[in-house]
Amino acid sequence: MKISGLFDLEMRLERIEHKGDPLQDLSAMVDWEAFRPGLESAREKERKSNAGRKPFDVVMMFKILILQSLYNLSDEEVERQVLDRLSFMRFLGLGLGADVPDATTVWRFRESLSRQGLTKELFDQFEEYLKNRGYEARQGQIIDASLVSAPKPRNTKEENERIKKGEAPGEWEPAKRRQKDTEARWTKKNGRSYFGYKNHVSVDVKHKLIRDYQVTDAAVHDSRVFEELLDEGNTSRDVWADSAYRSVETVEGLKERGFREHIQRKGYRNRPLNGWEKQGNRTRARIRARVEHVFGVQFQMAKDLVVRTIGLIRARTKVGLRNLAYNIRRFVTLEVQTA
């Protein structure tokens, strides 16, 4: 049996870095301390004395949530991975003998973000950081939405009808109520049924960065949050979207606000698209496909687009962190390409 030497850990980390450790780029290129002022308000209460264990650093806790989003880890799994993986420990600034937050601590910190609605503030803060680094929104914007599944409930038809009306069935025990998501909704896409939420995003064409987002239940039509996502700060007035957003009201509204619409056209039973319209759709699709790259990267990061939380507020936190983690990773990619 080989006895560990003094420099074994450093040698192992050097080997990991030589093989390629993306977390090293995240550590080196992102100003994590810039998040500290906003994160400090996430602490549940001020310490009344110095007794007991010192609370974990808020920036480190935030980086754990980013790791969760990048690798689709549960609270229990992220605790295990931080204990087990040298690259995770180095990213978090932890030594082998350091205390590691347990799953409950991670959950409580994320709950604090949810209650105070801080995730969107952190996202907007990083958006300003991107602009200051020269990555302002350019060449127009693409608006689209992706479905985010939630665990399917086992409700009766009557229970679902009452939930739609905003009524929780009275016969449910308190423990059962806590485990039932009464704010997620069913929807259909391409003939398949989905239960959960929607991640509505605005992505700039130049950098493929998410500039704004909204999270709703899955039944909300894409067009209902279209105007909220329009970015007046983009250097171009061009707007791309798929046919779900096309309506007379949407087209006229864009024109009134000085935007140039590039929304996919759709045919109807007695009015199919002509050759010119089909060609226009193909031209628009070449630009609009860039938003599919964003959703594709998010899917690749997480392996699936599922939130295992209860309620819209928590879903907004989980999806918002996923959008923020994507932007952080995309920023690092752009920096490496520039270098």
Image: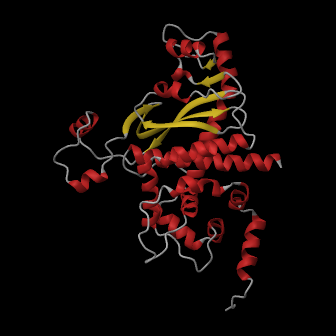
* Residue 329: % across, % down: 66, 50
* Residue 81: % across, % down: 55, 68
Total marks placed? 0
In this rendered view, identify the residue nearer to me: 223 or 228: 228
On the question of residue 306 being in view, the answer is no
Residue 26 image-quadrant placement: bottom right
In this rendered view, identify the residue nearer to me: 26 or 273: 26
Give the image's coloring scheme: secondary structure
Q: On the rendered structure, is 165 left or right of 237?
A: left
**Residue placed furthest toward the front:** 48
**Residue placed furthest toward the left:** 171
Q: Is residue 126 above or below residue 232?
A: below
Residue plotted at (64% across, 12% down):
277
**Residue placed furthest toward the right:** 339
Residue plotted at (73% across, 58% down):
25
Q: Quadrant of the N terminus?
A: bottom right
* Residue 120: % across, % down: 52, 44
On the question of residue 262 being in view, the answer is yes
In this rendered view, identify the residue nearer to me: 171 or 44: 44
Residue plotted at (65% across, 31% down):
289
* Residue 255: % across, % down: 60, 13
Q: Is residue 93 above or below residue 118?
A: below
Q: Is residue 15 above or below residue 143?
A: below
